[in-house]
Amino acid sequence: MEIDEVPVQEVKRLEYDPSIRGGKQLVIQKNNGHIFEVHVSHVDIPRQLYMQLVIPSIYFILTLCVTLYLSRRKKTIPLVNLMIAFIFSVSLAYISSGASARGNHLGFLVNSACLILSLVLLLHFLKNYFRYLGVKWVFVENIKFLYVLPVVGIILRLIRFIQPKFTSIDSLLILSIFFLLLITILWVVLRSYFLYKLPQIKLLFIGLVVPFLPFLFLFVLPKVLIGQPFLNADIGALFLLLIPFNLMLHQLTERLFDIVYHITRLQYYFTISFFSTCWLAIGLFLLVDLSSFELFVSTLFIFVSIFLVLYIKEKLDYRERKVLFSSKGNHIHKLYQTIDKLGDVHRVEQILSHLVNEVANHLEVKAVSVITYEFETKEVKSTGDLVGSSIDIKSILSLNPGEIIKKGDFYIAFIHQDLNTKRWLAIGHYHMIRLKAEELLWLELLLTYTNTFIESTKVIEELMDELQTLQQSGLKEPIWLKKLLWLRVDDEKFKFAQEIHDTFLQEYLHTARQINLLMTEENQEVTQAKLTILHEQMIHSIDNLRAYCETLKPPLLTSLGLNAALERLAERTTERANFVLNTSFDRLYLEDEQLTLIIYRIVQELLNNAVKHSQASIVDLELYELDNGFGIVYQDNGVGCNLDGIWNSNSLGLQGIRERVEAFYGNLLIETEPEKGMYIKIDIIDGRDADDFSINNR
């Protein structure tokens, strides 16, 4: 009957405008004629408390933190100003939605204008960002006329105050404009990604566009088409909280637009958090009487909490404790220390002695021995308290490198085998012992490294003995050894010097000349503009230098594995190449870990040659698994070359590929003719004794 002491007959727009939702005092007459007053406070309604106060406050704090950081650290970059404006417009649109829902006139105007303005700013940002990436803009070039649309939204809202019957139409028109703008942005981003396959565009779509999708498809689209949304606007707008998180993720790399950052790890944590949250949400649904809104908020809170706990725990474990997964002991840190000690010795006996001491100290056991079995004499020797003759040798002869088994009161672990002997590590105690899972893993890794150290040490010992024999015979070092070493060193020095001179040195000389000119410039505005350009050039040079360092030592190869490193290499090549690169990389399981680096270097040289010499428009590269090894096939439609003179061309790339393939007894096939492209096929068998190196074998 009354809203805030005003009779409903005097509320002219009650039929069209939800004024009742903003009322603080209502007079209601029930069907039985009973009249009573209801005093309404928004904090009395949990849904309004969360959706219009708590969550908007959190969103405002996140937005403020991100924009302050961007403004202080990157304010000289024009793209950042657009990003700050976009974030603030989204924030205002979300915060004002509560006031708009309660019928506040200012809330109507701010919400309508910012809802449309946010998408116009995002479209403007995308245009400049794609230009920064070197990607052709696929939409109309002049988009400044779109800034008229927020003004149109304000005009539509003002009309409702003049003509109340227009109230049901203005919201529909504003949502239609929002729908068309967001569809345009989706089309621009998706088409650009399919054309150029850049990971930056993919992650930009995930981080900035996806948060709008629930609001679009569950509220806007049903509201426009059928007049009834599937999801309330306040719940759909909750996904906008992902935008500040995404931008903070961008900033962790200290480079605003290099957003390829720990994607694999984040996907792993997302998967764990998602399935854990689903399980807990099912339990809440079955065991606790919650409304759909309360269940949604609880599920979102559980997911974010699990995700953050996993990520923070991984960071703390790695940086502070160096722990693998044990709650007691720093196994990984101690493994690094042990490997460092083993790497300082140069004799097999010293390696075995250090191994025994490290195992005894780390595992806190009283009896550690190295058991040696001579194949020729069938004699068993032991270096410690454990008696080798008490062990059944036949039962442990089949152990593989790094394998550990328990025999009674002690453990037997395989160390190394050569043509004459086989060695095991026996770990015992005067009483029954049982190693923990993390201790067994530490020991397995240590033995794997020890086996590699022994193999390398034996090769060095053979070479040193051969050189010592030559010296005692009055002969100098082999000429081939001197020539090989110095030629390889000089070739690599020349290659590095040439690339540095042609790239970084020229860029820095140009920058130095520009700075020298600015020293005499008196116009401050001109100086500021030129300094901005020089700053962007320096950032570009730093990115190129970082990419060059990644080429020399690929970090992804050791952290994420071969396939991740190859994918990253293909992306880098695509960014600087003029051809279409088609790749297919099988996941390999190789016994010889050295082959991982060999595969990476071969693929790297093939792609470098393609960029520098092929002049091709299409390059196909395939890495596939064989029954006992792997194969690589490279093919392009470029200019090709003369096969007869290919090895006389002093091509460091092809020479390096051939030497690497020969070092592992692989097969190399090259088919090429002038103007008919090039075909290269490489097969390498895993497990061949490529380390059987000595002077006599050469």
Image (cartoon, rainbow, N blue to C red):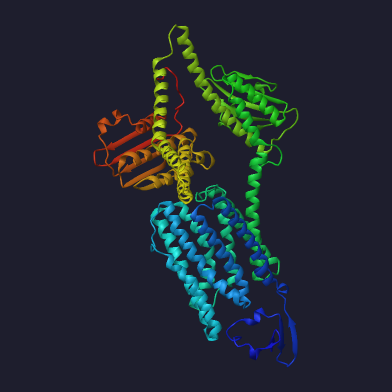
Identify which residue, 267 or 236, lies in the foreground: 236
Q: Is residue 110 left or right of residue 620?
A: right
Outermost residue toward the front?
522
Residue 396 position within the rendered picture, expressed as x and y whole percent measured from the top left: 59, 29
* Rendered image quadrant of residue 271: bottom right
Question: How many numbered discs, if any?
Answer: 0
Identify which residue, 681 or 333, lies in the foreground: 333
Residue 587 position within the rendered picture, expressed as x and y whole percent measured from the top left: 46, 44
Residue 340 position within the rendered picture, expressed as x and y whole percent measured from the top left: 60, 28
In this rendering, the answer to whether 26 lies above or below 122 is below
In this rendering, the answer to whether 654 lies above or below 222 is above
* Rendered image quadrant of residue 470: top left
Q: Is residue 428 left or right of residue 558?
A: right
In this rendering, the answer to whether 9 lies above or below 206 is below
**Quadrant of the image containing the N terminus:** bottom right
Outermost residue toward the bottom?
33
Identify which residue, 173 or 344, lies in the foreground: 173
Identify which residue, 661 or 232, lies in the foreground: 232
Query: Does any portion of residue 585 appear in the rendered image?
Result: no
